[in-house]
Amino acid sequence: MGHLLPIPIPIPIPLFLLILGVVWPVFGGSDDQSTACESLEINNIADFRKLENCTHVVGHIRLAYVDLTVLAGNYSFESLATNVTEISDYLMVYRCTGLISLQSIFPRLQIIRGRTLLFDEYGLVVYENRNLREVGLVELLRIQKGSIRIESNPQLCFVETVDWVYVMGNSTQQHFSLKHNRPPSQCPLCGSLTAEFDIEKNSSEKCWNVNTPQLRLRPPRSDDCPKSCGQNGCDKAGKCCDRNCVTGCYSLNCSLCGNLQGKMGCMNQCFASYEINKRNCIVGSECRDLGRIPLIRGWQCVKKCPGNQKEVPDAKGVIYCQVDCKGDFHIKSAADLENLQDCVTINGSLTIELTNIKEKIVEALEYALVSVKEITGYLKVIHSAQLMSLTFLQNLDAIRGDKLVENKYALYVVNNYHLEHIWPPNHQVIIQRGMLFFHLNPRLCYEKIHQLQSSLKSGENISVADVSPNSNGERVICGDGVRSLTPKVEDLNSTAVRIILDYMDWEGMETLIGYSYYYKEAPLQNVTMYDGRHGCGHDNWLMDVSPNKSRRHVISGLKPYTQYAYFVKTLTRTEYHIQMDAYSKIGYFQTLPDRPSPVVRIFGNSETSSQILINWWPPRRPNGIITKYIVFSEKHNSTKEQKDKNFLISESLNTKDLDCECVDVQPYDSGPQPDDEDYYNKEQITYEDALPNLIYVSRYHINRRKEFEKVVDYKHLLSLKKEEEPPTPAPTTPAPTNETIEKEKKAALTYERYRLKSEIRQRNLQDLDQERYRIRHAPPKCQNSRASVVQQVEDKCIVEEPLDGIEVRANQHSYRFTQLEPETFYRITVRACVEGVVNGCSTPAEYLIKTGSLGSEPYILGV
Ligand SMILES: *[C@@H]1O[C@H](CO)[C@@H](O)[C@H](O)[C@H]1NC(C)=O
Ligand SMILES: *[C@@H]1O[C@H](CO)[C@@H](O)[C@H](O)[C@H]1NC(C)=O
Ligand SMILES: *[C@@H]1O[C@H](CO)[C@@H](O)[C@H](O)[C@H]1NC(C)=O
Ligand SMILES: *[C@@H]1O[C@H](CO)[C@@H](O)[C@H](O)[C@H]1NC(C)=O
Ligand SMILES: *[C@@H]1O[C@H](CO)[C@@H](O)[C@H](O)[C@H]1NC(C)=O
Ligand SMILES: *[C@@H]1O[C@H](CO)[C@@H](O)[C@H](O)[C@H]1NC(C)=O
Ligand SMILES: *[C@@H]1O[C@H](CO)[C@@H](O)[C@H](O)[C@H]1NC(C)=O
Ligand SMILES: *[C@@H]1O[C@H](CO)[C@@H](O)[C@H](O)[C@H]1NC(C)=O
Ligand SMILES: *[C@@H]1O[C@H](CO)[C@@H](O)[C@H](O)[C@H]1NC(C)=O
Ligand SMILES: *[C@@H]1O[C@H](CO)[C@@H](O)[C@H](O)[C@H]1NC(C)=O
Ligand SMILES: *[C@@H]1O[C@H](CO)[C@@H](O)[C@H](O)[C@H]1NC(C)=O
């Protein structure tokens, strides 16, 4: 219910009053008649001059503390009328006295785009205007983004008579709040004097004031359109109308687009063209003709180059913006990234030192450094436990090494605990000059570093002193030994999933402590393991640790009807030298649907004494595909505390009655943190002392151990590997005697028997406690729809409960009750129902409302 909470609007306003806007009439737009102005602050009558000639405001308009009661002689209301048809950001009207209708100021305003919002939230705010009687934005068709807040205007009528849902660009993303204005029962109705005379009126009519109906453009067809059209309707041929076209059905020949207008029709963002005045997309030459600069990054047509960019003329004197990224940059936190935004070449060096492991920064790095192609100096990455790879430099092609660390190193990578990869796969970064220095990166395999040899232009060989196999990669097994896991989803319901792994083989069990399961919401199946990933457990992935050898695991607390990505990794003993972590590929699953949460934000009014029009918002968590709503009304015996006209019970209901108990786990709180290293060592190793003394592979094993003892350099390491490879004994070995052959054969058989036995034992160990991993399922619907309770228990099924009320289509969020008694309290309930779930309707949200009276309503002309 966040949008219903009052926000302390009046407090920050006076601050804004200090900032005085200046009008800059700018050229632009495609139509000749238009003149764009920048944001405007109107604080007194004289300021209205600034609006002269403006047809669209690129920015916001704030009318605050304007006193119009002095209007006389020199000014008339007519003289205030502006030609503004568009406001790109927002409109705020605050504490204006003597202002009766905004029609006198904005008679032609058609659209508020909401590109930048007031308090990041509002597109239209009309607040505390003492004399305002009507909103009167008679030509307004669309508030494309941002919420609407019309509040505490004691005389204001014609607020509820406006169809705000029609006005909003995307009603599922925007909200409106109309409060503490003049009660509608004391207001005139559309096209008539007062409610009293107009019981039989066609109340589907909407208006801005007595005389001006609200313009609501209708699609060519609204019935029998394809379902996907929603409320936008379709053309005669059944093609859905485009909601982005405000003035019609077709985006191609639209005269007013909700977002941007390009040559090819309405667009959501400029594509291969440049955005101007937050309303048009124009081609580069048009932008130049206006004396502006086309900026490729962000596709903007700008007057001058932004922030860290400078103007650079080319040979013909044409000005371009060029990012100027000069100097040595030291990134310690996200705030340091600002100066690197959009840099293609860093003329200098880059040092990354993310010592604050609590700060979530990997995504910000990815975003800020995406365009970096070249670093002229060196790249230094130190003490950054958060980094698992340097793939955030996804487009880096070269490190020039014009400047070097210690006059020697172009790439200097030291003490990064979780670093496992260097560059993105299949990507080479050329190092023009200088060497590598890699130390104390315990999870980075030596081979991976060694592969960089080919990108060193100096041709010098990597030396052991610079890149030590003893201080890199000692925490992981490097090379081909990495195992992979193959998890499968075995069962799931709406909030939990059971994942099962293949049996871990006998050897793997030796070092296994358990598994960690990573998962995150993934609307699309394009997730990769290193997306926004931190080294420290707190990344975008949520993590469950299962510190036992069971191959089953239940992840619970999931959101219903949601697709998740997941992968599994082993937890192995870190002190054991031949440690290898096995990973699975990324898989996906979707949870089942469930009952939706109650509908939110019910509101309604009784326009006539016999009718109640009720509106609601869809549930916050639909938990599936909503198929219908069930609305129900009954007379309510009013009691003392319910004297207030509109008593919204649903508000108190909603907070405690979200049907599903989803825990919104913050990625930050999940999984062990790096300082919990001991966690992984909880179970101490118990060596397999029972192993008979005739281990068949002992020779092989001894060799393998040696490999980790002392490696002089990489060549040495490679030579060790080669030696061990041929499984047949070396030819120099004396020919085996019949006796030894016989002995070995017997040993092999004994070993095989032993292996099988322990394999079975290990498998049983992985299958223990299966009951613990059950997924609970709701019983199915009974065949017999009248089954008794006993029958239901016997047949393990449930009966679909009939619900009183009227079914309303899922795409409709309002309902009109008719033939009601006047001046009577009604209790209205609304439920949302989901497909494929037995009894899949939400708990009812309630609303208490009284119908209007038949004849005794005060006859008030809205004075
Ligand atoms: C509006 O246009 C007129 C005529 O071109 C010009 O004289 C006047 O200064 C303009 N007003 C503003 C505020 O720019
Ligand atoms: C609005 O436009 C009309 C016609 O173009 C013009 O006569 C009038 O002066 C303009 N008003 C303002 C306030 O710019
Ligand atoms: C009206 O204009 C006259 C002369 O231009 C000026 O002296 C007077 O103060 C103005 N009145 C108001 C209320 O602005
Ligand atoms: C409204 O916004 C939501 C979320 O961005 C989007 O899924 C939906 O399609 C939008 N609806 C319309 C009508 O644009
Ligand atoms: C009410 O108005 C709508 C739209 O103007 C019209 O289609 C409908 O027939 C009217 N209903 C009555 C009862 O007058
Ligand atoms: C706009 O285009 C559509 C189809 O592309 C056409 O049916 C319609 O008549 C056009 N409208 C106007 C006003 O040109
Ligand atoms: C980097 O800066 C130096 C010194 O100012 C300058 O000579 C050089 O041209 C610049 N290089 C690039 C690629 O901008
Ligand atoms: C997945 O695709 C969507 C839409 O194309 C995109 O917004 C999102 O960034 C992609 N995610 C990844 C991890 O590539
Ligand atoms: C309302 O009051 C009447 C008479 O006092 C009673 O019969 C009826 O059950 C009450 N209804 C509700 C909903 O409390
Ligand atoms: C080994 O066994 C083979 C046949 O099994 C036999 O021909 C040979 O003489 C035996 N050699 C020795 C040294 O016993
Ligand atoms: C899904 O299964 C889990 C595990 O058995 C259980 O805790 C949960 O309540 C089930 N969810 C629903 C909606 O039944």
Image (tube, grey):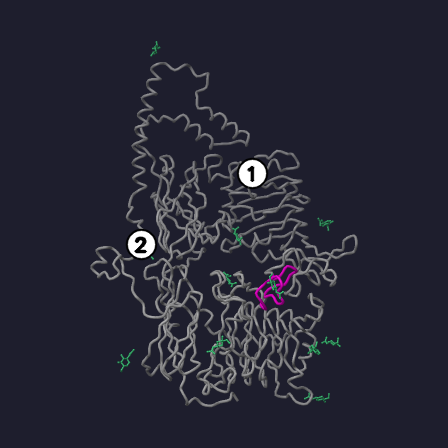
For mark 1, give the secondary structure: helix
**Residue designated by label 2:** 777
In this rendering, the answer to whether 298 lies above or below 213 is above
Q: Give me the disc on residue 818.
A: none
Q: Where is residue 728 in the image (x, y as percent from the top left)?
A: 44, 21
Q: Position of residue 584 (x, y in %)?
A: 43, 43
Query: Residue 740 or 165: which is nearer the viewer?
Result: 165
In this rendering, the answer to whether 267 lies above or below 202 is above
Q: Which amino acid does label 1 sit on?
A: Ile
Q: Check residue 769 for magenta coloring.
A: no
Q: In which quarter of the image is residue 578?
A: top left
**Residue drawn where x is 55% and y is 73% of the image:** 124
Q: From the viewer's perspective, is 758 left or right of 314?
A: left
Q: Position of residue 352 (x, y in %)?
A: 58, 50
Q: How far apart are marks 1 and 2 (CA)?
A: 50 Å
Report whether the residue tagged 2 is closer than 8 Å to ligand 11: yes
Which of the two labelled residues, at mark 1 and mark 2, occupies the earlier sequence position?
A: 1
Q: What range is drawn magenta here?
A: 246-266
**Residue designated by label 1:** 449
In the rendered image, the residue lying farthest to the left is 790
Q: What residue type is labelled 2?
A: His
Q: In which quarter of the image is the N terminus?
A: bottom left
Q: From the viewer's perspective, is 685 left or right of 451?
A: left
| Image label count | 2
